[in-house]
Image (cartoon, rainbow, N blue to C red):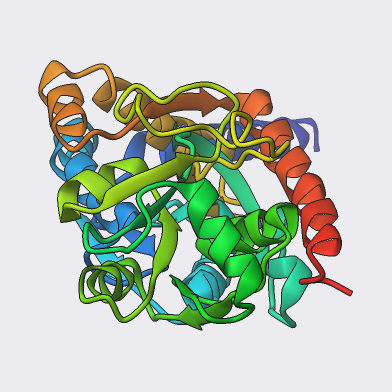
Amino acid sequence: MKRKMQTLGSILSILCLLVMAAPAAMAADYPSHTITVLVPFGAGGAADMHSRLLQPALKKRLGVNIVVKNVGGGAGTIGAAQAAASKPDGYTILYSPIAPICVQPHLRNIPYSYDSFEPVARVSNPPVVLMASKDFAFKDVASFIVDAKKNPNKYIYDSVGAGSIPHVAMAGFCNKAGIKMKHLPFRDGGEMMKALLGNQVDVGVELPHLATRYGLRVMAVFADEKYHLFPEAPTMKELGFDFSYALWMGFFAPKNTPADRIAKFRKAVSDSLKDKEILDKFKQQHVDLGYMEGQEFVDFVKNCYLENEKILIATGLKK
């Protein structure tokens, strides 16, 4: 009997060791195959460009293929919902701007919210800018506002969907300026830029580097301080409006993704953004990096979610 008890005790000890070793083994095995970075917008937009700039660096550091998958539509909610519903194993990672995470859950009946994800790391945090084609009749915002006040709904602005940052930022601007404009949403950033270039719409709001990339004219910056790329463009504060807006982007994992796998992917992102070659590529595209991780990023996302609810109520977008 004593020998049997000793044998049973040995078996239990071995089982305990195996259970304790399992997480470490899983961490060591990750990643073992392709990781999909899901971008909730089509090709040609900023999120798509960022993820593809990082793609080779992440592949180098993680040792597996990194596939960028574009799932557009619904102002980013279709792709974000797909990511939220993915298996939480670290092999599907969402790369998203602010709106699908912190704005759309306030506006749509969608199967996820901001807390359906584990924030991994923020990559960029630039202000958005008011832009128009070089053929636009007005050379400054003040004269445009004067005419827009005289002619409600004469002018059209575009966005990448209802509740997207271009939409929310423009609604906020119209509210502060006391003007009314028509909103024309497009499926993705590429279509939005083409509409501005082709004068299908009058103005739009997007990231600063897209104005440079597409040869558009920046009329104002949604910030309190001058923006280095367009120092001649007035800030919203200079125009007399207490309103600023940033279009940050970052990586998110589905809720309950193992912390060790998130940490491994996060480290690959962090190391990639210290790589001179990668930094040069972002600089060439005029992307403002603003790395953030850990609890700081978790708190940042939650606060952003709460602050956007206030903005949506103030602009009448959320009743």
Task: Name the foreground residue: 172 vs 81.
Answer: 172
Please give left or right for residue 285 compared with residue 11 in the image: left
Residue at point 16%, 52% (across, down)? 215
Residue at point 68%, 35% (across, down)? 240
Looking at the picture, how far across and down is residue 180, in whole percent?
66, 73
Please give left or right for residue 271 compared with residue 254 in the image: left
Please give left or right for residue 291 compared with residue 115 in the image: left
Looking at the picture, how far across and down is residue 204, in whole percent?
43, 62
Task: Name the foreground residue: 297 vs 178.
Answer: 178
Q: Is residue 198 visible?
A: yes
Hey, which quadrant is residue 54 in on the image? top left
Residue at the extreme right of the image, as rendered = 319
Quadrant that contains the C terminus = bottom right
Residue at point 73%, 32% (across, down)? 299
Residue at point 24%, 37% (across, down)? 62
Q: Is residue 163 above or below residue 88?
A: below
Please give left or right for residue 13 compared with residue 83 in the image: right
Hey, which quadrant is residue 227 in on the image? top left
Looking at the picture, how far across and down is residue 223, in whole percent?
56, 32
Task: Name the foreground residue: 164 vs 269.
Answer: 164
Quadrant that contains the N terminus = top right
Task: Name the foreground residue: 102 vs 261.
Answer: 102
